[in-house]
Image: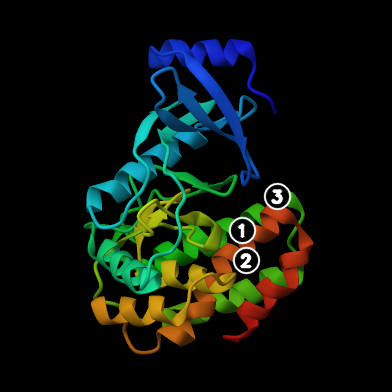
Amino acid sequence: MILSQKNKSELESELGQKISSLKSLSGGCISDAFRLTLDNNFSLFLKFNSEVKNDMFIKEANGLKEIKKSNTIRVPSVIKATNEFILLEFIEPGKQKKNFFEDFGRMFASMHKFSNEHFGFYENNFIGSNEQDNIADDEEKNNWVKFYFNKRILFQVELAEKLGNSTSELRESVSALENKIEEIIGSSNDKPSLLHGDLWGGNYMVDENGNACLIDPAVYYGNREADLAMTKLFGGFNSEFYSSYNETFPLADGYEYRENIYKLYHVLNHLNLFGRSYYSQALGLIRYYL
């Protein structure tokens, strides 16, 4: 997709500045990304998709603003978000400084200390291009197990049914999992933590000072083990990240056992985004507990 002259003129009108250059950037799988330079030589990051028929960019902006409130780890500042684009502070990519992952782990743990009274979030948002259901009912607001099973696992399984990605085998396995999930997750006294929601190696960058900066969030308040499990799914984080995290905000015993239940949400989401190549992995994660 190429930014049309009409879109460019509309952006100039929004910004009150002429755009002197627009450089296409790589990395976006849903939308097109650009480095936008204004006449005053100030650069901004633009993510644009005129074919998006929802408020995905607005929800992304709200997630970035929520993380920014924690004052713990850098995210790009939001300039403007509409249904067609999100305009952000341009962060010049840098090289990892010494002790990058140790500092990253500490900052991420500090972000997780930023808490809320209830599980969920004030609005639904997106995990990739799929909707993420964050509006908890009265029981789910204070019960992480119910929130996680209903709003994460069951939501994705029901989506798989609609998309033709489910089978009787998957349905029966999830039904058996429901009977065990209380035992698997157990009770936790942790307050609902601010979660990035979709942290893998592609959703952080290294800024000009060599520090971590979070991007593309799927924010909600939940059990922090869910965030950490996602970091294990595709790699991109080393042992220093996890050890410094645990020193800053120690995890409860048994978190390694619970990792697969939290990976399951993301694998089911990938099943619904990318198709049946993720089916066996999803089933394997369920069977780990059965």
Q: Is residue 52 above or below residue 223?
A: above
Residue on which the image places disc 2:
267
Amino acid under disc 2: Val
For label 3, the crowd category at 10 Å Cα-Cα, with few meaning under 14, some 14 to 19 and many 20 or more, is few
Residue at figure coordinates x 24%, y 76% from the top left: 248
- Residue in front for this viewpoint, 182 or 202: 202
Residue on which the image places disc 1:
269
- Residue in front for this viewpoint, 37 or 6: 37
Is residue 116 shown left or right of residue 255?
left
Q: Considering only order in the chain, which callout, 2 or 3, is on the residue closer to the N terminus?
A: 3
Tell whether label 1 touches label 2 (CB within 8 Å).
yes
SS for dot 2: helix
Amino acid under disc 3: Lys
- Residue in front for this viewpoint, 149 or 43: 43
Residue at figure coordinates x 68%, y 25% from the top left: 2
Q: Position of residue 141 (x, y in %)?
A: 31, 58
Residue on which the image places disc 3:
162
